[in-house]
Amino acid sequence: MSQRAKQAYVIMARACMILICFAGLFYVAGGCINTSNSIPLGLYWITKHPIQKGEYVLFCPPQKPIFQKALTRGYIHSGFCPGGFGYMMKRVLATYGDTVSINPFGVWVNNQFVAHSVPYPKDQQEQPLPELHLRQYPLKNGQLLLMTDQSELSFDARYFGLIKKSQVKAVIKPVLTWPSIT
């Protein structure tokens, strides 16, 4: 190996180590990275803000068969949540007192259609997806509707239904985001 190649290798190795250290410090300090198209791609900060409509949240999926199937099919990742699930990130689109409807034509909150909410009958591998039906359902205290606000392909409430507020680990705020390429 030439001297020039060795120097380039050392520079690249140091740069990688610095990047890994930065990522570790960011995580320990309360940062998280979103790589899914459910919310804008980028860096987020974990906060202690209250869970409110419009906020982005980090949550552990409940231990239900739909999430086990989602893990097996690759819709979600494995991680440190109970059941071996990874954290998920979504936007809170409905909370206590809001009225939700979900059907094969999409999702409505307080009679307003939610963009990107028409469910697909099958996934990209032609496997059937769950079909949910809620008709003018008033959310009870502790229930949330968590959805994408930008992707038609997101695995969200149109497939898994409502989530308990207790599943939410934190409200997250964008630090640096960029548009996804879909």
Image (cartoon, rainbow, N blue to C red):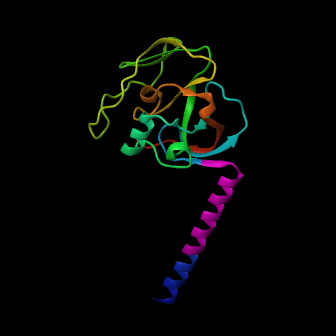
**Image quarter of the N terminus:** bottom left
**Image quarter of the C terminus:** top left
Residue at 65% over, 61% down: 22
Q: Quadrant of residue 122?
A: top left
Q: Is residue 97 magenta?
A: no
Give coordinates of residue 3: x percent, y percent: 51, 89
Can you name the residue that lies furthest to the left here? 126
Q: Is residue 28 magenta?
A: yes
Give coordinates of residue 10: x percent, y percent: 56, 79
Q: Is residue 15 visible?
A: yes
Q: Is the stretch drawn in magenta largely helix, strand or loop?
A: helix
In terms of depth relative to the viewer, which is nearer, 64 or 137? 64
Q: Is residue 55 visible?
A: no
Give coordinates of residue 132: x percent, y percent: 40, 22
In terms of depth relative to the viewer, which is nearer, 58 or 62? 62
Tell whether 124 sits left or right of 164.
left
Residue at 61% over, 48% down: 32
Stretch of the chain drawn in magenta: 12-32
Residue at 51% over, 43% down: 83
In terms of depth relative to the viewer, which is nearer, 176 or 127? 127
